[in-house]
Image (tube, rainbow, N blue to C red):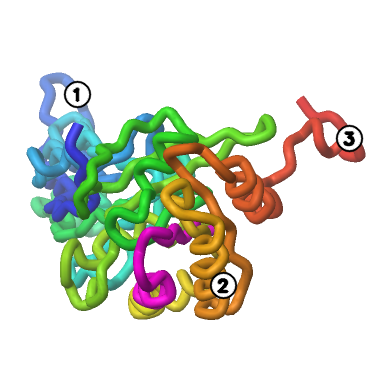
């Protein structure tokens, strides 16, 4: 399945049916009069977050969603049938934006969450509603209200507990493949990863979701390389794992490049907890590891862990460091709160 995280969609709710002008005329019935029914209501357009989806690829092949209009009213005080609603099923983590791609209509962060995008028009009144003591044979009825037509954008931001960031070929995909069942493409050239990957990671009996995004380069916030279009997928993460290629000649400059791009994209990313790791230590001797680790710590002003994703050296310690920052954000399970009374 192809990955698509941005889609433009055209929606329109159904118009209301027109009211009916009708009169009751039956043989041997003493009292006649107006009996026109109301028009049916137009269908609504909804969006719903569902399980089992992690891409917007369905909206590449269908961009127009028009709800049915309500039927017109009929005689004998019969109301027209209401139009059927349309539901856009989107992955959890989808943002719904106005046509300007800036104004947020809704943020779908929970399974089953629904939001009304376009309300259907009300049906018009039949002439029965216009009967008065002085106007016993009204010959007018209301037309139905028109539907609402609008253009929206769907933007998917994957929901993960931890997000992987780093320069191309920093070893992000190798690390994700080593700690989860995800099978991202791995090769010895940059920009191997072309779309985000998700993996479920386990450590000490605990599990969390990790997202790997394509590598960033200097100037990504200005559109260079793959640009910053994928940074939104780590924006929801509770912690960032910053991998630095230990075989690079200038690890401090590499780390500075990533931090600069994160700050240019959003201050929110810079405020997130971050675990910085010097990767690929299996290709270095102890003296080089110590030297480059010290240079990296001086650059970021904090501790740096060491790891080899290929040799799986130090991987467990990195996962534990990530979990220590993720655990406070998790809601306690019911069995972990014995002080609360049981409820059915």
The answer to if 248 sits in the magenta stretch is: yes
Task: Please state which of the two labelled residues, at mark 3 or mark 1, is closer to the viewer.
Answer: 3
Q: Residues within 10 Å of mark 2 (few under 14, many from 20)?
A: some
Image quadrant holding the C terminus, namely top right
In what element is the residue under mark 3? loop
Inspect this view and state whether residue 179 appears: yes
Precedes in sequence: disc 2 or disc 3: 2
Residue ID for mark 2: 294
Precedes in sequence: disc 1 or disc 2: 1
In what element is the residue under mark 2? helix
In this view, 23 is above or below 344: below
User: How many labels, in total?
Assistant: 3
Q: Residue at x 24, y 71 (%)?
A: 220
Q: Residue at x 17, y 72 (%)?
A: 223
Is 103 placed left or right of 336 in the picture? left
Residue ID for mark 1: 29
- Magenta segment boundaries in residue numbering: 239-258
Q: Residues within 10 Å of mark 1 (few under 14, many from 20)?
A: few
Residue ID for mark 3: 338
Tell me the CA gap for discs 2 and 3: 46 Å
The answer to if 7 sits in the magenta stretch is: no
Inspect this view and state whether residue 142 appears: no
> Tags 1 and 2 in contact by the CB under 8 Å rule?
no
Q: Position of residue 24 (x, y in %)?
A: 14, 32
In what element is the residue under mark 1? loop
């Amino acid at each position: 399945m192809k990955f698509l995280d941005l889609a433009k969609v055209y929606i329109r709710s159904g118009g209301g049916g027109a009211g009916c002008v009708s009169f009751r005329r039956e043989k041997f019935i003493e009292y006649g009069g107006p009996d026109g029914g109301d028009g049916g209501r137009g269908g609504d357009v909804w969006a719903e977050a569902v399980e089992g989806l992690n891409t917007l690829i369905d909206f590449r092949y269908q961009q127009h969603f028009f709800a049915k209009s309500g039927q017109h009213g009929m005689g004998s005080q019969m109301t027209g049938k209401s139009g059927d609603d349309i539901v856009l099923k989107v992955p959890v983590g989808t943002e719904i934006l106005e046509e300007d791609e800036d104004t947020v209509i809704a943020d779908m962060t929970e399974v089953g969450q629904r939001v009304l995008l376009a309300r259907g028009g009300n049906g018009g009144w039949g002439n029965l509603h216009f009967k008065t003591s002085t106007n016993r044979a009204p010959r007018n009825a209301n037309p139905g209200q028109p539907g609402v037509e609008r253009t929206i954008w769907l933007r998917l931001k994957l929901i993960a507990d931890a997000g992987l960031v780093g320069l191309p070929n920093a070893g992000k995909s190798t690390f994700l493949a080593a700690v989860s069942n995800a099978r991202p493409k791995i090769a010895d050239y940059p920009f191997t990863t072309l779309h985000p990957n998700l993996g479920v990671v386990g450590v000490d009996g605990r599990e969390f979701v990790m997202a790997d995004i394509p590598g960033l380069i200097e100037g990504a916030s200005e559109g260079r390389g793959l640009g910053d279009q994928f940074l939104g997928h780590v924006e929801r993460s509770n912690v960032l794992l910053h991998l630095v290629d230990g075989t690079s000649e200038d690890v401090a400059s590499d780390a500075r490049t990533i931090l600069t791009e994160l700050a240019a994209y959003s201050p929110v990313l810079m405020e997130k907890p971050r675990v910085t790791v010097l990767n690929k230590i299996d290709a270095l001797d102890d003296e080089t590891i110590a030297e480059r680790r010290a240079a990296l710590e001086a650059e970021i002003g904090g501790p740096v862990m060491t790891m080899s994703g290929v040799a799986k050296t130090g991987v467990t310690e990195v996962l534990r460091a990530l979990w220590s920052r993720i655990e406070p954000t998790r809601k306690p399970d019911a069995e972990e709160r014995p002080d609360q009374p049981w409820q059915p």
